[in-house]
């Protein structure tokens, strides 16, 4: 609340400075003998004065400090509200935000693992089909490095050695 009051006070001062600048502009206009042709001209002059004061004041370190305090206070309020919501949810035996976030991370990790396993299964199926058909298998995308190095010949069963008849 204090940070918001400081911030609002800063903008109140901006308004006062803009009015003072408009008054000085109008006095200079009167002294020079010029006239104002329309309400639109007055409005444009007012906007120009307000923008000039805003540009001067917002670039100061005082504004940066006040704005920083306000943002920090808002973030602290947001954090405290999150804690209060989690406490209320926990009191009603409902999952809190952190528990839901943990579950979301676990689901996401499970999806990644499933995709990885699906790629490996696809590569293994391709190798088995190649072995059955007798053709060398082209490695599938995502095939583990060890399987690529060993190749399908390492995984193929070796034919049994020829059996020689025993002589008596």
Image (spheres, rainbow, N blue to C red):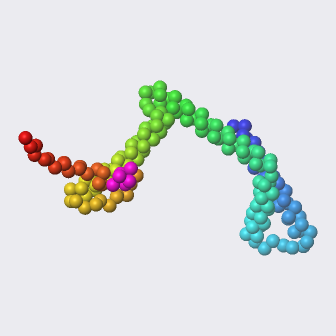
Answer above or below: position of 141 versus 99.
below
Q: Is residue 42 above or below residue 15?
A: below
Q: Residue at x 9, y 43 (%)?
A: 167
Front-most of residues 31 and 61: 61
Q: Position of residue 114 (x, y in %)?
A: 36, 46
How many numbered discs sit on the rendered protein? 0
Task: Answer whether residue 90 is visible to the viewer in this image.
Answer: yes
- Magenta region, residue range: 146-151
Residue most extreme to the front: 168
Q: Is residue 129 left or right of residue 3?
A: left
Residue 27 magenta: no
Regarding residue 8, the answer to whether it shows in the image is no
Residue at position x 80%, y 49% in the image: 61
Which is more toward the observer, 53 or 100?
100
Name which quarter of the figure residue 139 lies in.
bottom left
Residue lying at the far top in this picture: please name it.
Answer: 91
Assign the magenta stretch its main secondary structure: helix
Magenta highlight on residue 147: yes
Image height check: is 83 above or below 53? above
On-image quarter of the C terminus = top left
Q: Residue furthest left?
A: 168
Q: Residue at x 67, y 39 (%)?
A: 73
The residue that appears at 21% across and 59% down in the rendered structure is 133
Q: Nearer the viewer, residue 87 or 128?
A: 128
**Residue 110 appears at what percent x and percent y?**
39, 43
Q: Residue 109, image x and y in percent?
A: 42, 43
Q: Look at the picture and state if 105 lies above or below 32.
A: above
List x then y, in percent, for residue 82.
55, 35
Q: Residue furthest right?
A: 31
Is 100 placed left or right of 62 in the picture? left
Task: Report the quarter where the N terminus lies.
Answer: top right
């Amino acid at each position: 609340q204090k940070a918001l009051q400081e911030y609002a006070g800063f903008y109140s001062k901006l308004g006062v400075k803009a009015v003072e600048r408009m008054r000085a502009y109008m006095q200079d206009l009167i002294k020079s003998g010029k006239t104002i042709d329309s309400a639109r001209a007055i409005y444009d002059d007012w906007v120009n004065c307000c923008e000039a004061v805003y540009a001067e004041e917002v670039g100061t370190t005082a504004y940066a400090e006040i704005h920083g305090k306000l943002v920090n206070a808002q973030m602290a309020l947001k954090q405290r509200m999150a804690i209060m919501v989690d406490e209320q949810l926990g009191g009603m035996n409902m999952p809190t935000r952190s528990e839901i976030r943990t579950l979301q991370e676990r689901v996401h990790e499970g999806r990644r693992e499933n995709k990885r396993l699906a790629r490996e299964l696809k590569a293994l199926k391709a190798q088995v089909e190649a072995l059955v058909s007798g053709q060398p298998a082209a490695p599938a995308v995502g095939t583990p490095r060890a399987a690529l190095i060993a190749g399908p010949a390492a995984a193929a069963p070796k034919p049994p050695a020829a059996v020689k008849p025993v002589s008596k």
